[in-house]
Image (spheres, grey):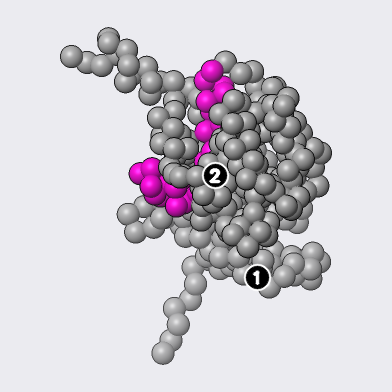
Amino acid sequence: MAIAPARPDQRSFEHHVLDFLAYLEYERGLSRNTLEAYRSDLLQLGDYLQRARVDVLDARHEHLAGFLSELAAGAEDRRPVAAATLQRKAACLRSFYRHLRRESVIDHDPTADLRAPRKSQKLPQVLTRGEVAQLLGAPKGTDPSALRDRALLELMYACGLRASEAIDLDVGDVDLRHGVLRARRKGSKERLVPVGREAIAAARTYLQRGRHVPQLFVNFRGEALTRQGLYKIVQRHAETAGLKDRMSPHTLRHTFATHLLAGGCDLRSLQEMLGHADIATTQIYTHLSADRLKDVYFDAHPRAQAG
């Protein structure tokens, strides 16, 4: 069976792709997996440019940006490309066209200002004050496990603790007299976080049952609580409170931050309490808090809804 000859422009494109991949393999020493990913990215680009009737050597910034935007948007038969994959494809295009420019195949690099489309940052799930009250009221009774669970949930919400910080707490880390908790994270400095009245009361009641090990939260065998054990505790009480599939242990940390900002806490103080090295990480809660305040406004203001 005779194979139809490739079109000149397509043959030219394939030649440039192969030359680029050879450069990456023999001069840059990139792995086979990376080479295959770049090859796939460039074949996608070739298909897009062919549909746009644009030669690869004539492509301008707007053509390449359009290619990435199409991938980000998806289609009926194709899901939107993940943000990390888009970044890789943009990096591939920049590397490919820089290679062509370096080899004097083109005079101008169309990727000089090329950036992958930024996806909107997904805001974390938070609970309302009513939902928090339901969750914290879920552990019932006075047996040791109920007292432990109540103290655990109260402290996680009161102090914005990460799961790893909660299970690593020692009895000496909670100063009930002064209302301060010392949170530790591997590789990070310690930080002090104020503890509210309800959390102090729950922790004091739990501690009055007697602790014979240094760890604050332990399982029924008296061993330090694990991350998996903490997750099961949170999920069990979330289901009791009608919050199943709505939250994880980290949801309490997000809720702590959002409620503090909504109550007037400044961003720098919140950064300190959360233990964020970069205030940019803390700033996501400003968007979340504003979004929550809008919800409250439209639910509560008598003239916010159309009649």
Name the residue beneath numbered marker 2.
147
Residue 118 in the figure: left or right of residue 279: left
> Residue 122 location in percent, x, y?
50, 40
Foreground tag (2 vs 1): 2
User: Secondary structure beneath disc 2?
Assistant: helix
Label annotation for residue 46: none
Q: Are marks 2 and 1 in contact (CB under 8 Å)?
A: no
Q: Residue 1 colored magenta?
A: no
- Tell me if residue 29 comes above or below residue 235 in the rendering: below
Out of 154 and 130, give the one closest to the viewer. 154
Residue 18 lies left or right of residue 305; in this view the side is: right
- Residue at left offset 59%, top offset 31%: 201
Is residue 237 at all visible to an observer of this figure?
yes
Between 281 and 246, the one lying in front of the other is: 246
| Camera-side residue of 307 and 249 | 249
- Residue 256 magenta-highlighted: yes
Q: Residue furthest bottom?
A: 1
The amino acid marked with disc number 1 is: Asn
Residue 306 rendering spot, x and y as whole percentages: 22, 15
Q: Residue at x 52, y 20 (%)?
A: 262
Nearest the viewer among 92 and 17 is: 92
Which residue is painted at 32% across and 12% down in the image? 301
Provide residue 142's location: percent of width, then percent of height.
50, 45
Marks 2 and 1, Cα distance to the nearest angstrom? 52 Å
Q: Which residue is mark 1?
A: 33
The secondary structure that dominates the magenta segment is: helix
